[in-house]
Image (cartoon, helix red, strand yellow):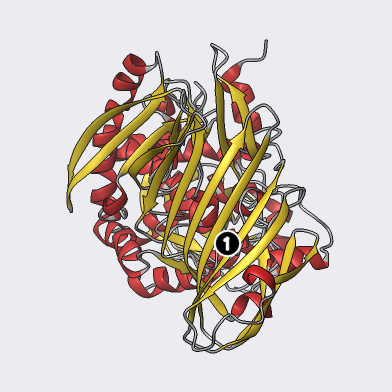
Amino acid sequence: MRNPTVWAALLAPALLAAQPLQHKSGFSHADTLRGSNGPFRAWWDAEHYDVSVRPDFATRSIQGRTTMTLRSSASGQRLQIDLQQPLEVDSIKMESAATRPTAGTGSSGHLSFQREGNVVWVDLPFTIEAGATFRVQVYYHGRPREARNPPWDGGWIWSRTPDGTPWMSVACQGLGASVWYPCKDSQADEPDSAALHITIPDSLVAVGNGRLRGTSRNSDGTTTWHWKVESPINTYNLVPYIGPYVHLGDSFQGTDGRLDLDYWVLRGKEAKAREQFKQVPPMLACFEDWFGPYPFYADGFKLVEAPHLGMEHQSAIAYGNGYRNGYAGSDLSGTGRGLDWDYIIVHESAHEWFGNNITSADIADMWVHEAFADYAETILVQCLHGPAAGNEYVAGLRRNIRNDIPIIGPYGVNQEGSGDMYYKGANMLHTIRHILDNDSLFKAMLRGMNERFHHAVVTGAEVESFISSFTGQNFSLLFDQYLRTTQVPVLQWGIQGGKLMVRWSNAVEGLAMPVSITVNGEERRVPITDRWTSPAYGLREKTTELTVDINWYVEVERLRGRALKRALRSAPH
């Protein structure tokens, strides 16, 4: 049997990254349709999704209806709606608040449509003018793609509890919400609100995002559970959970008042859940202090036991860590600090601020979600045990960095960059924090981000610009270094004529980054560029030792003799 700590550490960069990690060398027309805001997406915005679904566990199929409330920002007549095969569209209808009636849509108001792979092209009976609100209802059915290894290779999850009871859910980040309901499957357009109506056998319980608005008993032995989300929500975050759940209630007195804490766990897990979820209030207190108020007071905070490890489903976080600390019982940092808290509770809850409150428009910029959520773990360790423990934890995560491809992926084709967005992204933020050397400013920056981009969709470039502007330091080359290359800056140093010579190598052109170094036991902070400079004199080559503060994610190379002379000749002073 493999050592779980070592095995988790080796696999973690691949396991934790969101879903399509099969990095492509080329892209198809279908990739562009999915990943870009093309002309038949761009003219309308989703205001509300009302999703009704009835799963059939025996046949592993679903029947559904999604009512999309849309608002036109420009005139248009054709819609691109996404619904992944093998799900089939039965019919599409239109209700309009535009100035023209829906006459001409055909019998019973049905709209014409065509399938092109996972896209449904819908032709409206007349041009919708800018500023109009209209509704489109899509009726569909079929066997949705089944999750092979959720949440990393996702889809609809057909599972059973240990006692054999049906247990169902969805995990679809990266793969996309259109794997189970029709929508504009793009992070660039979040509906302002959403509703879920989940019809299941009376013996089961259905949990969704937001708040429970009621249940309806049907005449066929089923019950429909009605859930409503009041806040903007990523389409991939809207999911059902279906199983033999029981409810545990609690509350947290936060910065914006009383926050409802709801835990939906499998029957028989109540005692374990009550004990493990005691971690939630102190975590929320820490995160509210550092990031600002929890972003979804209107919808509450939920943990829902899930048939997979976990996912940041807004206001209904999927929890499957087995009521144990660490990441599946292991410490990803190798320091022991990661065993003091439950990884899934902490990491996925951090996404409520970074990923759900602040959402990247393109998954190429998923570092905006994952770097900050991963760094939230360091913040939590610091809240529990102090700054030195946090520094130790984040430095320990470096063992998982691969530097295989850049963190930022190609835009417009629904493709992420490297899984290094987690650990390398966190260490980039830690480096920025220590360059600033001002924790009050760094904390204000994190809080300011969540205020400035409250319930907003952003580009990575906007986040980069905000950080530089807020802190008063231009970090553009540092972002280029860590996000757009696989190069780790190397502090090259050597002694020439009694002078300490230093520079950054393996760096983007013009990189200037101050760093704290210790020379022969004396700590000093020095500005270093990609040109040779001399910050210290009167040193002897044989007795001089130099170390770099662990809080910078850099490497160190000492040059001597001919190697130093060659390097000095090859680069300007």
In the image: residue 130, left or right of residue 410: left
Query: Where residue 64 sits in the image (x, y, percent)?
Result: 60, 49
Q: Nearer the viewer, residue 222 or 530?
A: 222
Q: Is residue 415 above or below residue 243?
A: below
Mark 1 is surrounded, within 10 Å at the Cα level, by few (under 14), some (14 to 19) or many (20 or more) other residues, namely many
Q: Is residue 92 visible?
A: yes
At horizontal 54% and vertical 88% (from top left) the residue drawn is: 100
Quadrant of the rendered image containing residue 165: top right
Residue 548 visible within the image: no
**Secondary element at tag 1:** helix
Amino acid type for the residue under numbered disc 1 = Asp
Q: Position of residue 141 (x, y in %)?
A: 68, 47
Q: Nearer the viewer, residue 519 or 531?
A: 531
Q: Residue at x 39, y 37 (%)?
A: 346
Picture coordinates of residue 510, whole percent (x, y): 58, 73
Q: Residue at x 55, y 62 (%)?
A: 187
In this figure, which residue is indicated by the disc labeled 1? 365
Q: Quadrant of the C terminus?
A: bottom right
Instruction: Give residue 471's position: percent from left, percent from top.
Output: 34, 69
Q: Which quarter of the rendering shows the N terminus?
A: top right
Image quadrant assignment for residue 526: bottom left
Residue 3 quadrant: top right
Looking at the image, how many numbered discs can be counted on the residues? 1
